[in-house]
Image (cartoon, rainbow, N blue to C red):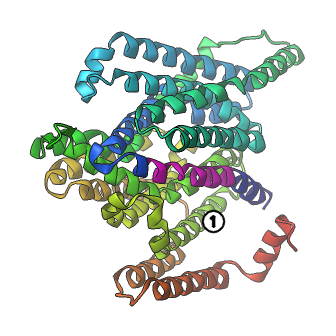
Amino acid sequence: MASMKSLAKDTAIYGLSSIVGRFLNYLLVPLYTHVLAVQSGGYGIVTNLYAYVALILVILTFGMETTFFRFSNKDDENPHTVFSTSFVMVSTLSVIFFAFVFLFIEGIADFMGYVGSENYILMMTCVVCLDAIQAIPFSYLRYKKNAIKFASLKLLFIIMNISLNLIYFVVLGKTDVFYVFSLNLVCTGIITFFFIPEFLREHFASRRYAIEHDEQLKIVDFALMKRMFSYSWPILVLGIAGILNQTIDKMIFPFIYSQSHPVQVDEMGEIASPAAVQLGIYGACAKIAMIMAMITQAFRYAYEPIVFAKSKDADKKDYYATAMKFFLIFTLFAFLCVVGYMPILQHIIGAEYREGLRVVPIVMVAEIMMGVYFNLSFWYKLIDKTIWGAWFSMAGCIMLIAVNVIFIPEYGYMACAWGGVAGYGTAMVLSYFVGQKKYPIEYDLKGIGRYVALTFVFFCIMNYTDWPNTAIQLFVNTWLILIYLYVVVKKDMPHDTISHLLSMLHLR
């Protein structure tokens, strides 16, 4: 119960920073979709480049976040040396990558279709390298249970980024996509400096540890580095396949869609890319569905350190099964809220982009599947067989790419949305069935199935009923959401559980 209390507390803190931060960041979506006209393709460029950034970040960190937690919790490892070795590995790779992009920027820009806009690529390369360098210090904050500082730095970045964007795009009236990337770079650079005190504290703590244990102080332990790399490379493959499931559609869409929809020139002589336009619509609408990504990320930040710390407890499997069930209960509740209040949420994006709102439920289903897959993934991490995760994610990625390549020419961005469901669904199913053989956990499939079925019925009512007006639609949808909550309380939150949660929150 103590572990579950810790999970709830940390999830609340991480969730607050993630959800509030993402909500504040949503302010940029209506901003960009109003100042960047849909036909300019500006938001499509943003969507495309940030997809590359997400993939490169996974490569540069190459599984060191999970590896750091695993080795820091081993009794025979020095956690301070684990930290410094991890940081040096990631930082060195980031510097090498930046040098490579800088030297070959013209060829890279030509391949990506950004000739004349090389500065976009260079700025985002700086951003992704700084993000990678920050990854291990952020993981260290999670390891030290310093959720407050973690959340504060995440929110500080978002507040600075939003403030500067409002100044440039609203006050100064800028309409160039250049400022989207340059302002991100400025804010990322500022956050990096806030880790200097953390490095100093860690250095002195490392010296004390070496003296107390009569060990030689090591900044980089090459023997440890070799062991960590052996553990992390399958996670890297897993991470690449996993992030490709999230971003590959946005990366390959311009290449595939442009084959059947070439660049056009309007009466004013301005070049318009149908691929960038369609990708901008898809990227903007998919932002509404990112509530699922927020929940999964908040859950992961709190859950991952606890899973490894609890791996020695006798009741660990019951804990994992319970966590899975409540994760699904909460994400399905969020799904109903987004679908139910879509008449309001649609105003997050500009009117020109709303033709793509039909992708929102589909993308949310894909995100839920990703969250389930994340929960299922711990069996192979706990038995140090991370190669299984690589195989599952690669299978999912292959499925996603196949759906996109086959169907994008005819169905456009709708193929991207359904490709995510196919990809995550494949990885999820494979992980479950193999996991039940290798590391069986008795999940409450009957209870989970009940909530999935209830959510499906309510979704159909919300989405396919011809309502006379929006007010009635919102009224009915609200009651459906309340009925869902009633079922949750009745079936899975008896009085003693509710009393305990209230006591935890000091509301009783």
* Place of residue 252 in the rendered image (x, y in percent of width and height, measured from the top left): 25, 40
| In the depicted structure, whether residue 289 falls above or below residue 446 | above
Specify the principal SS of the magenta part.
helix
* Quadrant, the C terminus: bottom right
Q: Is residue 423 left or right of residue 61?
A: left
Q: Which residue is mark 1?
A: 322
Q: Residue at x 55, y 61 (%)?
A: 441
* Place of residue 86 in the rendered image (x, y in percent of width and height, measured from the top left): 61, 22
Residue span colored magenta: 14-32
Q: Residue furthest left?
A: 260
| In the depicted structure, whether residue 156 falls above or below residue 476 | above
Amino acid type at circle 1 is Thr
Of residues 53 and 2, the one nearer the viewer is 53
21 in magenta: yes
Say which element carries label 1. helix
| In the depicted structure, whether residue 56 falls above or below residue 415 | above
* Place of residue 1 in the rendered image (x, y in percent of width and height, measured from the top left): 78, 62
* Place of residue 431 in the rendered image (x, y in percent of width and height, measured from the top left): 42, 53
Q: Residue at x 57, y 62 (%)?
A: 324
Q: Residue at x 83, y 15 (%)?
A: 207
| In the depicted structure, whether residue 274 falls above or below residue 442 | above
